Amino acid sequence: MAKKTSTLTPESAPSDNTPSANTKAGGGNPRRPCECGSGRRWKNCHGAADAGADLIVARPFEGLAGEVELIAMREFVPSATAPLTLSKAARAKHSGDEAPSVMVTTVLPGAAAALTRSDGSILLGMQTQVHSGDLARDLGGSLQWALAAGPSQVLSVAPRTDDAGSPVPKIGELIVDEPLDVTVHDDFGWWLESPAEPGSEVAASLEQANAAVLPTARVGEQAGAYWVDAGEKAHLRWVRAEDEPKVMAALARLAAAGELDLGDGSRYVGSFRAHGRLVPVWDLDREAHPSEWAEPVAAFAQRYEAALADDSPLTAEQRRARDGILGRQFTLR
């Protein structure tokens, strides 16, 4: 699981009318606190040349059909890939005659932002060492770079602007909006275009990366639901697409009814926030194969959908259950 950090809540996230660099035209000391409430001086925040680049977008993938899968790939799935379909506008940006294949991935060698292969195909990395506050714009900038780059190129850090100095597009502007078909891999063999020579530096690096992969699998046909063997325990982490108040109310109804677990060998342990969505987590019996959880999870999904559809006020017992669930949360940025 990714490192626990603080984040902006939707209420405190910057809005479209946050102060801009032209605020200075209206007068004021550039050393004054910035009006956006960040706590930084104006000249180092919205008065900076790249103002807004580091402000956190609380829900970067909002509106995308693949939102929950992108969050999972960014935060806790170790090795996975999913194909993306370029939009007509993106195909026009490509320097070659034919549009390349594009894959979004969990992580690339060296935690690179993107790379192009010898055949011109493109790989985009979700888990990068350096990123801005808008992950969707990072992905869009990386894809825009890759479309113009030649074969066998590597992008270490996603660009914030294009060659003309304009902000790069968000990923949703460059791809067809459709659900992601995620493939989970046991290792990082897909990094290589051809098998590594035994005993080579490449083979050693790949072996080291593979050793860090926690066994992970998708659970049934549930979007955003992943089983992971963390060693002492196995877990189910399930990124939910609904707004947090609705998720919490549904979980509270199920908890009050004694229906929050997934069956024998499971226990609801809490949830975390990631990129504007809530991720409930269950402990699971690690002796059970991931496929054995597909049916219990599908049954839970039916109970959960029924609880979501119930818009009656929570009872006193359900409110107490909700308070208990709220007490077991933390936030990922």
Image (cartoon, helix red, strand yellow):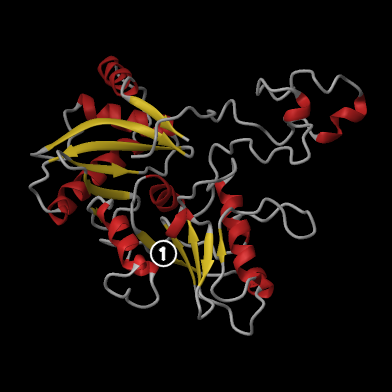
Evaluate whether residue 108 shows in this view. Answer: no
Q: In x, y percent, where is residue 73?
A: 40, 52
Residue 200 in the image, given as x and y percentages of width and height: 32, 70
> In the shown orientation, is residue 154 left or right of residue 300?
right
Question: Observer-nearest residue: 305 or 216?
Answer: 216
Residue farthest bottom in this picture? 97
Q: Amino acid at mark 1?
A: Ala
**Residue lying at 58% horizontally and 39% vertically, measured from the top left:** 57
* Whether residue 310 is visible: yes
Residue 275 in percent (x, y) is at 48, 40
- In the image, 236 versus 25, the foreground residue is 25
320 up-or-down from 205: above or below: above
Left or right side of 269 for 202? right
Q: Work out whether 78 lies above or below 199.
A: above
Question: Residue 78: percent from the left, percent from the top?
Answer: 33, 52
- The quadrant in which the N terminus is found is top left
Seen at 69% across and 23% down, the residue is 40
Q: Secondary structure at mark 1?
A: strand
Q: Classify residue 314 by image quadrant.
A: top left
Q: Which residue is mark 1?
A: 82
CA neighbours of label 1 inside 10 A, class few (<14), some (14 to 19), many (20+): many
What is the number of callouts on the image? 1
Left or right, 288 with respect to 143, comes to left
Residue drawn at point x = 69 percent, y = 55 percent = 168
At 59% from the left and 59% from the top, the residue drawn is 142
